[in-house]
Image (cartoon, rainbow, N blue to C red):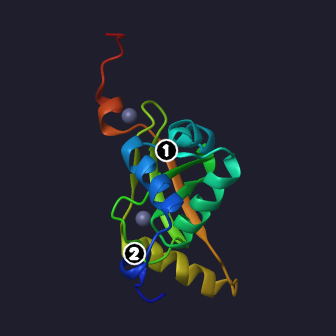
Amino acid sequence: MKEKSTKSVKLTKNQSLVLDALIKAGQPSGAYALLDTLGQHGFKAPLQVYRALEQLIDLGLAHRLESLNAFIACSHMSCETSGATAFVICDECETVQEICDDTVSGFLTSLAKKTKMKASKSNIELHGLCNGCADAPNSNN
Ligand SMILES: [Zn+2]
Ligand SMILES: [Zn+2]
């Protein structure tokens, strides 16, 4: 486990702007969608967004959803590591829930040890239907 240092970290202006946009979006956002929002703040190139995202991910403040090719703010703003994360993703309404459970990260860490693999990151993404969508009657209203 890495030591907790997120709280003392000072974000650059760009990083806080990107993080802000992610939080406001409240859903997984692609870099280009973020760039749209951030244009008014002087962002011009996707690379600026990607750079800020990368650093936010390193700090455990944001996470990357590989299967959606999108980014999301950490739901508790304090992941000790962005190296072992898990999400449930609804394919219907695209709701994403971060699973904040030490069991998961503990399991991933032990799995890495067992396989003698020095895993730098692991991310579980479970796709399916959320409660609301699974219960919804099959009509279009
Ligand atoms: Zn997190
Ligand atoms: Zn749903």
Q: Nearer the viewer, mark 1 or mark 2?
A: 1
Q: Residues within 10 Å of mark 1 (few under 14, many from 20)?
A: many
Seen at 35% across and 31% down, the residue is 134
Seen at 69% across and 46% down, the residue is 45
Q: Give the numbered dot on residue 121.
A: none
The reply to whether residue 26 is in sight is no
Tell me the quarter of the image containing the C terminus: top left
> For this rendering, which residue is in front, 84 or 36?
36
Q: Amino acid at mark 1?
A: Pro
**Image coordinates for residue 68, horizontal then vertical, percent:** 59, 43
Closer to the chain start, of discs 1 and 2, is 1
Residue on which the image places disc 1: 28
Residue on which the image places disc 2: 103
Q: Quadrant of ligand 1?
A: bottom left
**Image coordinates for residue 101, horizontal then vertical, percent:** 36, 69
| 29 to the left or right of 45 | left
